Every structure is written in structure tokens, then in C-alpha cells.
Image (cartoon, helix red, strand yellow):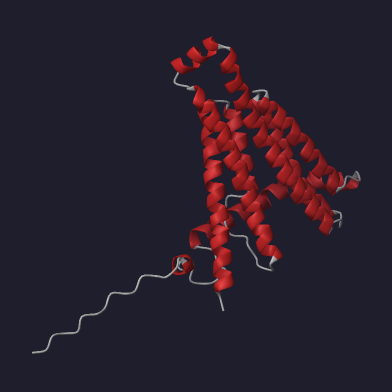
Amino acid sequence: MSEAPVAEPPAPPKSFGPLLERVSDAPGAAPPREGALRRLKERLRVLAHRALDPIVRGLVRAGVRANHLTLLGLGLSVAAALAFFDGHSRLGALVLSLAGICDILDGQVARASGGETRFGAFFDSTLDRLSEALVLIGILGFCLRNLVALVFDSSRVVEQVSVGLLPMTWAVVGLTAMLGLTGSFLVSYTRARAEGLGLECKVGWFERPERLVLLIVAGALQVFWAMSGALLVLALFSFVTAAQRVAHVYRLTRTP
């Protein structure tokens, strides 16, 4: 009686390509869970736009242009950054909310007035990146202020250590803010670079609106754990979203 042939074990993959390609069967398609999140985001966006429609019509009648609102949003972001730097996180959250509203209104006003231009889109995206950077730098500045103050006031060190807040904590939170800034830039850059290559890259759900909401909620709570936790989540999910976009572009460019 002859022995049944023993099947040879499959050869190990020579690269990580197959692992990336298994994320989605259809090239360019978003995973089902991500698709559901994107549909939810779209519904919320539509509701927000409908709620702001009366304001948009009034602004158009008053002759306000989209670029005016973009600049106003930048000014409000500067004010929010200064408020966070000075430790007034609730005020910073309020002003940042107004900046976020301007970010919604500028696009709506451009469409309603027929004033959409390629430069306007470029200008808006550029100032959005600057606005976000300023806010996170403001939070970093607040951490550095507290860290420097500990050097000159030993009683403050004892007071903070007694409640479990070590001096190194301020440095860690500040570093997390910079990681969040790096991740948020990567999210924007990966999409811009892909679109510059002629590829659509709208995958990943943790984008600018989610980052803004996270900082606004954390600032409104005005407690240390809320902001430190928010920065950690912001940094982590920003890098995850950037990685999703890298994997998405990899799949698209690997498709024959």
C-alpha cells in the first residue's frame, strides 16, 4: 500500500504585499466598517450644512467672500492657541469651535456665491494646516510653561507630585502634542500626494473634523487627563489613518 503524498507547506510570502492586498478584495474599496463610518460622517456633514444654510445666505447677501472666512478662521485659531497656551482651555475650546464653524462656512459660501476657485481650495487647505499646527503648538507651549515653572518653584513640584503628577509628565504630554501634529500633517500629505499622482485617496476616517472635535471636547472638560488622553488618541489615530492611506495607495498602484 503506497503512502499518500505529503503536501508541501506553502512558501512564506516574500514581501508584505499580500498582507496589504488582503485588506480589501476590490482595489480602492473601503472596508465595510470604514464605509459605514464614512456614511455617518456624510450624514452629519449634511445636517451641519443645512443648519448653517440661513447664515450662508446672509453672508452671501452681505458680500462676504469665502477667503474672508478662511482668514477669520485662522485668526480665531491663533486666539485659541493663545488661550490654550495661557491655560484657559475652556476659552480655547470655545474659540476653536468658532474657527471650526468658519471652516465649514467658507466652502459653503464659495459654492453659494459661485466663487469656487482652485486657488481658494489651495488657500483654504494651506491655512487649515497652519491653524491646526498653531493650536497644537499652543498646547505644547502650556506644557513647557509648566515644566519650566517647576524648575524655579520647588514647592510646586512637591504639590504636583503629591497628586501623582510627575515633572516628566509635562514633557510626555508636550511630546504627544508634537506627535499629534506630525500625524495630522501625514494624514493631509498622504492624500495630497496620492491625488497629485492621479489617485483618489479618501480612505481613513480620522480627519480634521474629528481632530477638532476631540480637542474641543478635551478643552471644554478642562481636566488634565482629558487633554492628555485626547492628544494620545489624536496622535495614534492620525498615524493609523495615514497608514490606511499608504496601504490604499499601495493596493491601487499594485493593480495591473
Residue 147: % across, % down: 58, 22
Q: Which image quarter holds the N terminus?
A: bottom left
Residue 202: % across, % down: 62, 60
Viewer-proximal residue among 102 and 113? 102
Q: Is residue 158 visible?
A: yes
Viewer-proximal residue among 128 and 72? 128
Residue 27: % across, % down: 54, 71
Q: Is residue 146 above or below residue 211?
A: above
Q: Which image quarter holds the C terminus?
A: bottom right
Q: Is residue 91 above or below residue 29?
A: above
Q: Is residue 43 visible?
A: no
Viewer-proximal residue among 119 and 98? 119
- Of all residues, the one furthest to the left in this rendering is 1
- Please give the name of the residue rendered at 62% of the width and 51% of the height, measured from the top-left corner: 186
Residue 133: % across, % down: 68, 40
- Of all residues, the one furthest to the top in this rendering is 155
- Please give the name of the residue rendered at 82% of the width and 59% of the height, measured from the top-left corner: 118
Q: Quadrant of residue 162?
A: top left
Q: Is residue 165 above or below residue 135?
A: above
Q: Quadrant of residue 201?
A: bottom right
Q: Quadrant of residue 182?
A: top right
Is 15 positioned to the left or the right of 175 in the image?
A: left
- Please give the name of the residue rendered at 48% of the width and 22% of the height, measured from the top-left corner: 165
Viewer-proximal residue among 216 and 6? 6
Is 222 positioned to the left or the right of 84 in the image?
A: left
Q: Report how many numbered discs are placed on residues in the image.
A: 0
